[in-house]
Image: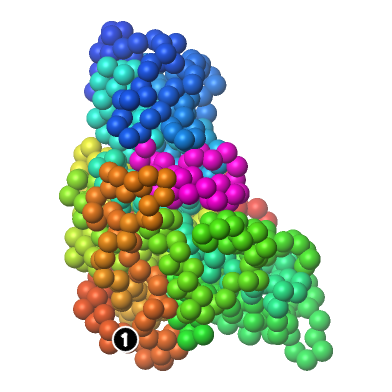
Amino acid sequence: MTGASMTLANAAAERAQSSAPAATADGTSTSSGFAPAMPCSGVSSLDLAAAVPGVPFQITSATEVAAADNTLGAWAYCSVQGVIAPQIHFQLRLPQSTWRANYLQLGCGGLCGGVNTGSAPASSGCVPLTDGAFAVASSDEGHHQGNGLFSTDPTLRADFGYKSDHELALAAKTIITKYYGRAATHSYFDGCSQGGHQALTEAQRYPDDFDGIVAGAPANNFTALNTFSHAWTAQSVFLDGGPATITTADLAPIHAAVLKGCGAPADGVIADPLACHWDPASIRCDSGQTPTASRYCLTADQVTTLRRIYAGPTDEHGKLLYPGYQLRGSELNWSNVIVPTTATGTSGDINFVRETVRYQIFDSPQPALTYKDIEFTKAYYEKVMRLGEGMYDATDPDLTAFKRAGGKLILWHGLGDQHIPAVGTMAYYKAVQQAMGGAEATSDFARLFLLPGVAHCGGGQGPNALDALTAIVDWVTRRQGPGQPADEVARQQREGHLLAPGLPLPVRRREHHGRICRRPVQLHPGQVHGGSRPDPRLARLLPLRLRDRRQLGPRQVGGDQGQGMTSGARRQSNFGRRASGGTALSELRRQGTPPDHGRAAWTAGEQGMGRGRGRAGGGGLGLACRQQARRGVIRRS
């Protein structure tokens, strides 16, 4: 590990050894953790149907699992399975001797449809997890399959949209209290992709459920992402519904051209892709030229495809319909997601759009719709987004209730993400800063970290093994946010870490054929790294016109879906909905200035950007660089 995560993990290990509770079998404690107050076999006979008002659930099984069979770490646990009405299936892992009064809830991916407690995102080397300090739970979000058919039922739609995680938190905490004879002291949520969406839903709607939340690559702008963003890339690759203009075979030479055009370092990772403006037309084929391995070039259609992918979905006025787009340098990660293997194949984007438009956003199933039917107009956008208001999206930037409850939030996103553009998370974080009173007030409880070259929830070309889980635990329990205090910097320098000049994050020098593992990059909203000029390309993504905070709430389906939510949780901001107003992209590009409306928000945004090297979130979130050089290219081991 490098940077803060090394210290955080070591500190967690020291605390585990020095402050472990002491022992009996009646719910007090053992030398390594709190002991259960009842045998695992007795859990299945508990009648808890009425234990949580409004959340009827039952336990279907409880079995002991040996430490050798635990994928999370070497600790034995009681595996509890159950169902929350009507059909939210869940699993809860209850450590048998190592529990330290912590609860961890995990998110899922895609459209969920399965229960997985076997791995936790962003937890590489997390000692509390591998040592069994957490009781761990997750659910299938109320359905059994991974496609969108479940959304034809209004109750299951609400369970997936926002209800299931809150209800699981209530049920799991009740079981924990019964099993150990005491409640969990701290509760955490950790998720990536759809799990990141779930994480932000909890922070916005149910601010008292969790003390600490880790949200990776969040699909929180769910409706616009799965319609306009994915359909845009699909229509860009399959121009006019024809064969793909770009396939997997094109990605390596395109990526090589991007690295050259962006002036990337020898390790092939672009640290700040927002600062690169490489134009695909620079390698357009000459008249009569055929691309070869030694001299690759692009056809006119391929230039069009790439330009559209890098620009993002816009309406007829040039306004973004989703606050994000693919960043230059992410090309190697596009295979089978944005581009198919063969010209007549399909892509992940096509499949994502199909499930969403057929079953999830309209009031009745539309089984004939495909990505080809998505219209990139203001009218169509407003129609689609109006249908899903208050159901799927977690875009409310007002996290006042979460902050007031003492909650801490770590957002992270790979800049090479091929599924969910990282720029959308930057835009959301900027909206949070504006809503919460600026960068400093936001960094007190919420911080964003960007990982150069890292693909969706991991992988890619950059160092991608990070431990945000330990970081959030220390932030909650020790009030030590992911940062670099002076004594920590001095220690790192003594141990071979280097502090890059002018940068707030440490770089651990681990050379592979002269290459150095790169750092995670903090969000400097609107700032070009290494310079002092605000980046106008980020300016066009800022909210600028947050909707009036009117009460939306979900439509009343399957009962009182708003039960238990705070009033602020029912608000859904329109931070990415540029179609309803604002200055056209062409004007923003030309002027580099804000539109007249929302001037106060823009001014706050400028202050949040800072000048020069202003910081937007404390110090570094450590990464464990796990790379090796093969044939001159850094790849993950």
Identify the residue at image location x=49%, y=45%: 156
| Label 1 SS | loop
- Above or below, 201 relative to 609: above
Residue 69: where, in percent of width, then height? Answer: 54, 21
The residue type indicated by label 1 comes to: Pro
Q: Is residue 163 magenta?
A: yes
- Above or below, 85 relative to 322: above
Q: Quadrant of residue 309?
A: bottom right
Residue 465: where, in percent of width, then height? Answer: 48, 46
Q: Quadrant of the C terminus?
A: top right
Identify the residue at image location x=24%, y=56%: 568
Q: Which residues are magenta?
A: 140-167
Residue at the disc numbered 1:
595
Badge 1, how many Cα within 10 Å: few under 14, some, many 20+?
some
Residue 310: where, in percent of width, then height? Answer: 55, 75
- Left or right side of 78 for 487: left
Residue 583: where, in percent of width, then height? Answer: 37, 86
The one nearer the camera, 218 or 483, is: 218
Coloring scheme of the render?
A: rainbow
Is residue 341 something one can see in this rendering?
Answer: yes
